Image (spheres, rainbow, N blue to C red):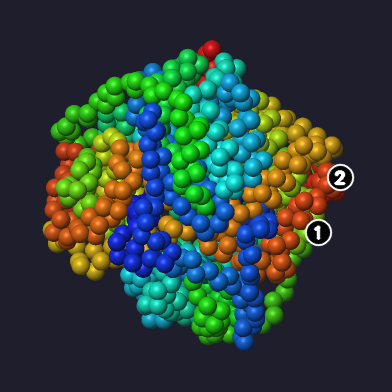
Amino acid sequence: MELRRFSRGFALCSALAALLAPIAPARANPYETRLDNGLHVIVKEDHRAPVAMHMVWYRVGAIDEHDGTTGIAHLLEHMMFKGTKTLKPGEFNEIVARAGGNDNAFTSHDYTAYFQRVPAAALPKMIELEADRMRNLVISDDEFARELKVVMEERRLRTDDQPQSQLHEQLMASAFIAHPYRRPVIGWMNDLENMRPDDARDWYRRWYAPNNAYVVVVGDVDHKKVFEQVKKAYGHMKPVQLPVRKMTAEPVQTGERRITVKAPAELPQLAMTWKAPKLVDVVNDREPYALEVLAGILDGHAASRLPKALVRGSQVAVEVGAYYDATARGETTFMLGGTPAKGHSVAELEAALRAEVKRIADEGVSEAELERIKTLTVAAQVYKLDSTYVQAMEIGRMEASGYRWQDADLMLEKLKSVTAAEVQAVARKYFGSDTLTVAVLDPQPLDPNAKPRAKPAGLRH
Amino acid sequence: MRFRNDFLLVNPMNRFFRHPLLQAAALFALSVPAWANVNIQHWVAANGARVYFVESHVLPILDLQVDFDAGAARDPAGRSGLAGMTQGMLDAAAGGLDEDALAEKFSDLGARLSGVADNDRAGLSLRTLSSARERDGALALLRTVLTRPEFPAAVLEREKARATASLREADTKPDQIGSKAFARALYGDHPYGRSATVESVAAITRDDLLAHYRRHYVASRAVVSIVGDVTREQAEAIALQLTGDLPAGEPLAPIPAVTMPKAVTERIAHPANQSHIFVGEPVTRRGDPDFFPLQVGNYILGGGGFVSRLTKEVREKRGYAYSVYSYFNPQREPGPFQIGLQTQRAQAADALKVVDETLAKFIADGPTDDELKAAKRNLVDGYSLRLDSNRKLLESLAVIGFYGLPLDWLSKFPERVEAVTAAQVKDAFRRRLSAEHMVRVIVAGD
C-alpha cells in the first residue's frame, strides 16, 4: 500500500505528550494566525536541526475542475515555476537551489501545494518567493506550450504505459459517474490536447488568493518572526471572491458495476471499491473511525489479515491490499484488491477478499488486533517527529482538506476509542454488492512490434 | 497493491535518491555545518563486528541497521536472486517463531523491520521506540531473526512462486526491461550485470539459502549502525547482543573486477507509448579519488533536479520529457554512471541527440564558473537538510561503515566540495567518461 493512514499518522496524542514532555513542552506549538485577507499561517517550531520546511497549500485541486479542462489544476501547478512579473522562468528553482534548498510541488484531487526545504536562514526569502507567485504569475503562450508537452509525457509515463494506473483510472471513472473524483488528476489526454493558455490564466485568477491558502512552516524558526515575515509578504493582498464550489454529489449507486481493462501485462489484477462514508463531524462521527481501523486490521501492517490469510495462508494471491481514507473534500470509498497467484483466478481472489470482510462481519475482530492497530498508530506519532516533511504534510493536508490541524489530535483519540463491535458493524453495513464497483485488468500478450494503442498526442494550438 | 495514482509531483523524485541501490547516495550532499557536530563513535566489537554510533536523545526513537557483505554480487552463477531471497526470508521463521508470530510481535511493539538489499550489501534495519519495553523486545526479535533464521522449505516455495510472478510481470514493463538490459550491457557476466530470472529463481534451493546465510551473515563482516536514544554503553551491548551468536566467518574472495564494455546501442522492441532511454558506463568505486569532482559535476549535468543542464535542455527548452536525470552510483567495484529519460517514441531520436550533445559539451568544456558556484552553494549550504533526521543519519552511517570510509568523511565534506575547481570537474569527466565505453539502451524506440 502506498498511502496508509497508519503510517501517515495523526498528531501527538495525550498519552504520548507525557512521554515526550521533555522535548515538546506543553505549549501552544504549533502556533497559528490569520491575516486580515484570510491567509492562514501555521508554524510548528522544531529546533532539532537548522532547517525549515516551508509549504503553501491551496484549497483547490482536480475536484474543482470541469469537463473539457481536466488536468488544469495540475498543469497550473507546473506553470507556477515559469516566471512572475519579476522572475524569469526557472529562476524560482535557481534561487532555492542556490540557497542550499530543494523544492517541489504536488496536486491531488483535493489540493495543490508547493514546498521548499531550506536552511532556516533562507526562510524569509522563500516566503517572499511564494507570496510573489501567489499574485504575480506570468503565463506566456510559449512557456505554456512547452510545459503542456511535459505534462503529456508525464501522463504517458504514469498512466498510459502503466496497466495498473489505467485500472485505477477507469475504476474511479466507473465508481463515480457524477462526482468529480471520476476524473483523473492529471487530466484526460484529449483535454490536455485542447488546453489553452487562458484556461491556466483563468484558473490562477480564480483560485490563487490569500483567502484560499495556508502557509505551513515546520522547523528551526521563531514563530513570531515568521508571522511578521508572512504579514510583510502577503499583508497587502486583497482577498478575492472565490467561485462557488458546486461539487456534484454522486447519485446513490443501486447496483454492482463491473469493468474490464485490457493492457499488455503478465498478471491479471483486481480492484474493488465500495461507497463508504467520510469523516464530516470529527467529534460525533463514529463509522469513519471504525472503517479506518477495519482497513488497518485488513492491511495496515505486516501481521494484518489479508496478507496473512491470502498471500501466506491460502496463497490465492501474490499481493493484496486495502485502502480507506476517512478525510477528503469529496466522497470516499473503501478499496480492496490484489493480484491472484498462478493457478488462481481473479474470481477466486474476489471471493477470498470478500470472505475476509464477511468473516469480520460474522465473527468480529479480536481485542489483540484492535490493540495492535492502536499501538502502531501511537508509535507512528513518535516516528513522525523525525521528519519535518511529515509534520508539515499533516498540518497542510488537514487544513486544505477542510479540517483543522487540531482535529488530528482528536482523530487519534477517537481512533483509539473504536470498539470491536463498531468494526464489526461497519464490516456488515458497507460491503454489499449494490454499492460495489469491480475493475479487472485482463492482461494481453506483449507484441513487441505492435504500435501503442493510445493515440499519439498532437498539440493543437 | 497500489490504489492511488492521483498525487502528482511537478518534478519526479530524483532517481539518484530514490533508487533502492542508491540509498547510499544521501552521502553525496553532506558537508559540515556550524551546528552539526555529528559525533560518530566507532569501535570493533569483541567478535569482530564493526559498530558506528551517533548518540541522540532528542527523540525517544532508536534506529539501527545491520549490514553484511551479502548482496547480489555474492550470488553464485546460475542462482541470481539468491542474496535477495535469503535476506527476504530472514523473518520467514526464526527461533521457533513462524512468520505470522514474528510479524505480530514486531507490530505489537510498534516496531518497524525493513530489509536492505543491493549489489554489495544485505541486511536488516529496525526502527523502534526507545522506551525499555519496546526497545528490548524489538532488539530481542531482531537478534532472533538475524541469528536464528530457519528458512522453512514451504515458505521458500511460496516466495519463489511470488518472485517468479513478479519477474514475469517485470518482463512486460519497459523501464524494468531497460534497467536489466542496461546492467547486462554495462557489466556482461560480472555479478553487477546479472539479474534474477525465472530460471535462476527456480534453481534456488533451501540448501543454497543456508549456505549463503552461513557464509555471509558472519560477525567479522557485520556492520552495525546505530542512531538515537541510547548511551554508548547500551550501544556496545546492543551490537554484541545482535551479532554475538553469529560465527566469526571465513575470509571471502573479493568480487571480480569489472571489464569495461565496448560502446554499443541496444534497441529492444516494445509497444509502449514512450521510449525508455538509458545511457552510461561503469565509472566509480566508493572511496574514488575523483568522487568530489564527479559528484559536483553531476549536480550541474543532471543531478540537480530543476536546475541541471539535462533538465533545462531536454525538459524546459523542448518539452521532451517529464523526467531526465543523471547520476553516479559508487559501489565496491565501479558502479554505473547513468543518464535516463522517457519520451514519446516518435521523438526518441531527437531527445537522445540532445542528451548526447549536452553530455559531450559538458565533457569537452566542463562547467561555467557560475554553475560551479551555484552547485557549491547548494551542496555546502544545504548540508543540514541531508542530516536533519535520525533516519538520514543512519543511512549515511551505514555507508561509511560498510565501505570503510574515514570517520571524518562528513566533517570534511564542505571543504572538499569547496575545493573542487572547474578544471578538476572537466578533467575528471574527460578521464572517466569515455565514448568508447558508452552504452545506450533504448526500449520501445521507433
* Above or below, B265 relative to B122: above
State the residue in front, B81 or A430. Answer: A430
* Above or below, B434 relative to B155: above
State the residue in front, A141 or B174. Answer: A141
Crowdedness of circle 2 by 10 Å Cα count: few (<14), some, many (20+)? Answer: some
Q: Chain of mark 1?
A: B
The answer to whether residue B430 is seen in the rendering is no
Amino acid type shown at disc 2: Ala
Check disc 2 and report the residue beneath it: B423
Between marks 1 and 2, how big is the CA–CA gap?
15 Å
Q: Position of residue B268 (x, y in %)?
A: 63, 39
Check disc 1 and report the residue beneath it: B289
Q: Position of residue A414 (x, y in %)?
A: 22, 55
State the residue in front, A390 or A335. Answer: A390
Q: Position of residue B368 (x, y in %)?
A: 80, 36
Total number of numbered labels?
A: 2
Q: Chain of mark 2?
A: B
Residue that appears at 42% across and 67% down: A22
Q: Position of residue B31 (x, y in %)?
A: 68, 56
Specify the farthest residue to the bottom.
B46
Is residue B432 toward the left or the right of residue B272 in the image?
A: right
Amino acid type shown at disc 1: Pro
Query: SS for tag 1?
Result: loop
Crowdedness of circle 1 by 10 Å Cα count: few (<14), some, many (20+)? Answer: few
* Above or below, A62 relative to A275: above
The answer to whether residue A214 is seen in the rendering is yes
Is residue B295 toward the left or the right of residue B269 in the image?
A: right
